[in-house]
Amino acid sequence: MKLEEKNTGVLYIVATPIGNLSDISERAIITLKDVDLIVAEDTRHSKPMLDKLGVSAALLSYHRFNEAARCDELIKRLLNGQSIALISDAGTPLISDPGYRLVRAAHHHHIAVSPIPGACAAVAALSVCGFDSEHFYFAGFLAAKSVARCQQLQQLKSIPAMLIFYESPHRILATLQDMAKILGSHRQALIAREITKRYEDIQRDRLTGLITWLQQDDNHQRGEFVIIIDAPEFSQQQRKVSEKSQQTLEILLEELPLKQAVELAAKLSDAKKNDLYQLALEMKNKSYP
Ligand code: SAM
């Protein structure tokens, strides 16, 4: 049976652009013009975009603070045959945005839920990162406070997949610094800033390099950010050296020439000097995660 052939309405989950209005799909425009009601995270934010698209459907707010209460009302409308489109401020609803309660309730009532796919900042950044993209873990926003953030990073550290995060401008530097501390400053990463907008910036480097880049110019810390961290590669050499010894060596290498760093690391840790030497070469040759 086609979606429209059921007596109940259809709940459309409609992706909107993340900066460039031209990224809206033709199907999204048709759907938004066609539905009985558009449910938007922030109606004031979405209204100008809908006006530009020539969409005049009724608008209702649906955000974190009224999500639970709105759900019953929207389900009643859908059961009465009305079709509803859910949009968020930007990108794909439910991706670090509200909506899952409504979608879950719709499934519970056997109401058809249909995606109208489009922009998503995480996927857009992934598509240009050039890391092995077979597996990825979307971690969304980390905690606002450094202690909690570091605990979360510690848990994510050894996931054998690239990690994708969202971050706000006022925390981008502190978050990158915590990532370097917990995941290792040599880990390859990417910052995708202001994707699809005028000042779009894609920077790919080790975490240390990205921190330097952020500090170089205040403008580099402005706008919206996706951070991607490449999957950890555990070399044979790393497996021979404990994590604590690796961290010691890494810190020493930032301050001292290779030979001296290895000598000192061997004295400070239980690792063999030759293993540390081989690992130091890997780190210098940038084959270290
Ligand atoms: N649902 C959205 C999506 O599909 O990407 C994400 C919503 S989340 C509340 C907003 C965050 O997404 C921003 O703080 C930023 O981390 C990321 N983001 C959204 N638009 C972006 C853009 N144009 N460039 C970089 N990051 C963006």
Image: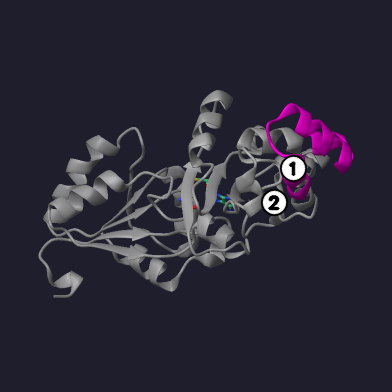
Q: Would you say residue 141 sits in the magenta stretch?
A: no
Foreground mark, 1 or 2, reads 1
- How is the model colour-coded? one colour
Residue appearing at x 49%, y 61% in the figure: 119
Question: Could you tell me which residue is drawn at 61 percent across and 61 percent down?
Answer: 131
Say whether disc 1 or disc 2 marks the residue closer to the N-terminus.
1
Number of the label disc, if any, that sits on residue 288 = 2
- State the residue at coordinates (12%, 68%): 6
Instruction: Name the spot of residue 90 as percent of width and height, x first.
Output: 48, 52
Pick the front one: 104 or 241: 241
Mark seen at residue 276: 1
Residues shaded magenta: 252-279
Q: Report, in whole angstroms, how far the alpha carbon at label 1 lies from the one at label 2.
A: 13 Å
Q: Position of residue 166 (x, y in %)?
A: 54, 45
Q: Quadrant of residue 34?
A: bottom left
Helix, strand or loop status at disc 1: helix
Query: Label 2 amino acid?
Result: Tyr
Q: Nearer the viewer, residue 282 or 150?
A: 282
